[in-house]
Amino acid sequence: MGIIQAIRGTRDLLPEDIVYWQKVESVTRKLLTQAAYQEIRTPIFEGTDLFERGIGENTDVVGKEMYTFLDRGDRSLTLRPEGTAGVVRSYIEHKLHGQGGVQRLWYTGPMFRYERPQAGRQRQFHQIGVELLGSASARADVEVIALANDLLGNLGLKNLTLSLNSVGNGEDRQNYREALVNYLSPYQQELDKDSQERLQRNPLRILDSKDQRTQEIAQNAPQIWQYLGENSRKHFDTVQQLLTELGIAYQLNHCLVRGLDYYSHTAFEIQSSDLGAQATVCGGGRYDGLVSQLGGPETPAVGWAIGMERLILLLQQIQPKPLPELDFYLVSRGEKAESQALILAHKLRKLDFSVELDLSGSAFNKQFKRADRSGAAICLVLGDEEAHKQTVNLKWMGTKEQQAIAQTELLGMVEQLRQQIEAQKNPVI
RNA sequence: GCGAGCGUGGCCAAGUGGUUAAGGCAGAGGUUUGUGGUACCUCCAUGCGUGGGUUCAAGUCCCAUCGUUCGCCCCA
């Protein structure tokens, strides 16, 4: 088409969509505030090296999915592909670690990855994320997992599965990596093409290949749990034990490997069976090395990110679109009546009512039709007659009862009307 | 980056090479200068994503391009 349109992989959130976003945002804000998390907002672009160093140069995200460009000062900048790196940069830069103890932070906002759009995947997408910095305790891992679980639960989502794994510390992973390569090498020719390439660069990723033959081979591969050191083992056990005590169901999955290099110990994902191929709603884990790697003090940390678009796809499946709530719909016809209606609408809004004014000037029956569709509790009618007598016709849309009252009187019976409207919204059974 | 499907008015759609492109919803006007979830009438695409091509003839076939959908890869 000749018209200008939104860039591929980006989307406008229209009024009919936005009710879901506002719902998610308000539930999130409430839950995380209750858990003593504070919101943080960082820029949506950063220096490219932050992501290269933070996420890892060998990851797909950095290797082929970043929106990177030179600004007018020849600096290489990148639209953030995820939230953690920026939060950690900010944490270090503003010395939030200096404030002692742990920092509990959350964020929400757009992220950017250059990928082929697909169900549940866009080039600009939005995440809600949580970062708990400064605690190495397994309780921190579990606190954070429980929050994700509660957030999804509070929104009424069903059919979710929490998968859990430990990828150990750097040393554990190094030992395991060698063992895995030793095991896989004899099968090299049988692996799928992608996995063959990964054998040297990133062998752990081979474990969650979707290729059937590769999966069969991976079935009998050594498991990372056998290579966890004592501390790693203990941490992992404690996480499981605490999850059980909290009554949070999980599935152990030794093949769960996350795509960003900074994860250590706990890695987890929450998936939904009600999405397409992109089924992961929430992903996260522990990243004890990241803060120091980016130039801060040794700081253990855990966090997760939830994909808003995927969350909302699920929410739309279970929640019918909420109707906008409206107290008054004003119908008017004739010059004098129309201006009186405008003034009346203004006054009612000042009294804290929600009011829609019909501006069409069309026939009364058309205006009533719109009043009906607006979902308003009350329709106020002003024609020549009312305008003349300074009255207004008050009609309850539910019962069709109506009465003529003086405009001044209407404004005086505010409390009574408010109660009646409330009673209608929540009928006593 | 790779593979497959799809693209008709604001929305949903029929149409499978032959004359003026069904229908529904929404919208506008009217029957009814003033009373709504009902009825009836009228109006609402010189054009079928865009650009080429084949043909006497193209929304219908071919090519390209853009967008979209579903996968792969990867992730939220």
Image (tube, coloured by chain):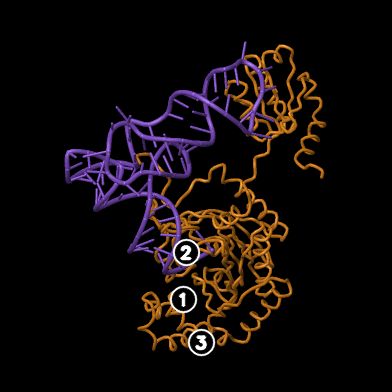
Mark 1: few, some, or many residues within 10 Å (few <14, many ≥20)? some
Of labels 3 and 1, earlier in sequence is 1
Quote the CA–CA distance across marks 2 and 1. Answer: 20 Å
Read off the chain for label 1: A
Residue under numbered circle 3: A222
Q: Secondary structure at mark 1?
A: helix
SS state under label 2: helix
In the rendered structure, the answer to whether residue A288 lies left or right of residue A392 reads left
Helix, strand or loop for disc 3? loop
Q: Amino acid at mark 2?
A: Phe
Dot 2 alpha-carbon crowd within 10 angstroms: few under 14, some 14 to 19, many 20 or more? many
* Between A114 and B27, the one nearer to me in the picture: B27
Q: Colour of chain B?
A: purple
Looking at the image, which residue sits at the far top? Answer: A388
Q: Quadrant of the N terminus of chain A?
A: top left
Instruction: Say what amino acid the circle numbered 1 marks.
Output: Arg
Looking at marks 3 and 2 on the same chain, the residue that comes earlier in the sequence is marked by 2
Numbered disc in front, either 3 or 2: 3
Mark 3 is on which residue type?
Answer: Pro
- Image side of residue A216 versus residue A363, left or right: left
Q: Is residue B18 above or below residue A343?
A: below
Q: In x, y percent, where is residue A148?
A: 64, 64
Q: According to the image, label 2 marks what residue?
A: A51
Q: In the displayed structure, would residue A23 be above or below residue B22?
A: below
Which residue bears the numbered disc 1?
A205
